[in-house]
Amino acid sequence: MVDYIGVSDVQRLVGAQGPAVFIERLAAEIEADYRRWDAFDKSARVASHSPEGVIELMPTSDGQLYSFKYVNGHPKNTAAGLLTVTAFGVLADVATGYPLLLSELTVTTALRTAATSAMVARQLARPDSRVMALIGNGSQSEFQAIAFYRMLGIRELRLYDVDGAATAKLAANLADMAGMEDLRVVRCASTQEACQGADIITTVTADKRNAVILTPPMVRPGVHLNAVGGDCPGKTELHADVLVMPQVKVYVEYAPQSRIEGEIQQMPDDFPVTEIADVLRGRAPGRTSPTDITIFDSVGFALEDYSALRFLHQLLQEDSDHRRRIDLVPRLDDPKDLYGGTLAGAARRMPLRRAG
């Protein structure tokens, strides 16, 4: 039997401690795994692209546990009442190859993306950052807002989306969140207005195109850019000139993947970037000056999903009263007799008939 976590289970596990605490705990798990970077198999995700979107597989292993995530990205889905991104994942035991957990990852991906964003920002943003521009107010935005409020001390959010209804949705959800009453929410009429006075700029837009969300005049010295929305070939958010501004430092999760899918796909192959694991392990500097412009070119990496699956599985063991299991793998008295242990009974009830 294999442990199973559905959407209702994630709602219960997150609800037991609250989204903010859950995200902070998940961020600690992700950071701990990045600090043992050399233990993991690493590869760019396997992607199947179409004009409508992309379907990807994201595998990794630390030699003890193996995980993969299936995830899609279809920006036009919302017009049909469907989610832009859906996902599920598997955690398996390397020693036997047996799956341990089958889990939803649609909600969890939003949680781990926000956790990673805030974890990295604690390394790169100025410690006195209190104002964040949030460009793109769709399905990821509440998670980013919660993470940066909890982990960075953000107390003013400046919101903008080309879809005013999305901004209204986000503002309403934020107003309804307990414990965030001191958060000031400012609805802005443009990206440029949202960026005014921002210490951190988070871009999390959904259009699958080479968009120009930020240009150099919007980026002031000392800002930290959390560029989340550009996550596949042909999908970017930053004008290329932003990446080469004076005092800019670009950080990525896994450089070979980011050069295909991130903001740096616009740049030459030798464009200098730093993997965030090197910062966490003290092998490369983060911010060295209050005037540095730090960019986290985030595309999402398999290690983060590994961390999330392992964390969920741990929580599930602690919540045994609600533990659900499914018969994804046969249980046999004789491991060499797959037929006899599964289908022989059906064959006795329904004798084979000769063709013709």
Image (tube, rainbow, N blue to C red):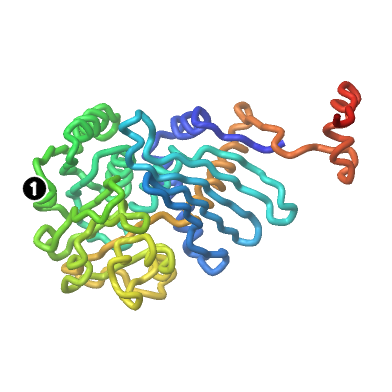
51 or 345, nearer to the observer: 51
Residue 289 x %, y %: 20, 71
Left/right placement of residue 98 relative to residue 39 reads right
Quadrant (top left/top right/bottom left/bottom right) for the N terminus: top right
Quadrant (top left/top right/bottom left/bottom right) for the C terminus: top right
Location of residue 52 (image quadrant):
top left
Image mark count: 1
Left/right placement of residue 340 relative to residue 309 reads right
Left/right placement of residue 251 relative to residue 338 reads left
Q: Secondary structure at mark 1?
A: helix
Residue drawn at the location 33% of the way across and 45% of the way down = 147
76 or 172, nearer to the observer: 76
Residue drawn at the location 87% of the way across and 23% of the way down = 350
Estimate how packed mark 1 is, as few (under 14), some (14 to 19) or many (20 or more) residues with alpha carbons within 10 Å.
Answer: some
4 or 154, nearer to the observer: 4
Residue drawn at the location 21% of the way across and 46% of the way down = 135
Of the residues shown, which amino acid type is indicated by label 1?
A: Glu
Residue furthest bottom as drawn = 270
Residue drawn at the location 29% of the way across and 62% of the way down = 263
Residue 103 x %, y %: 56, 39
Residue that numbered label 1 is attached to: 193
Q: Is residue 13 above or below residue 31?
A: above
Residue 30 x %, y %: 46, 54
Residue furthest top as drawn = 349
Left/right placement of residue 332 relative to residue 250 reads right
Location of residue 271 (image quadrant):
bottom left
Residue 211 x %, y %: 22, 54
Residue furthest front as drawn = 356
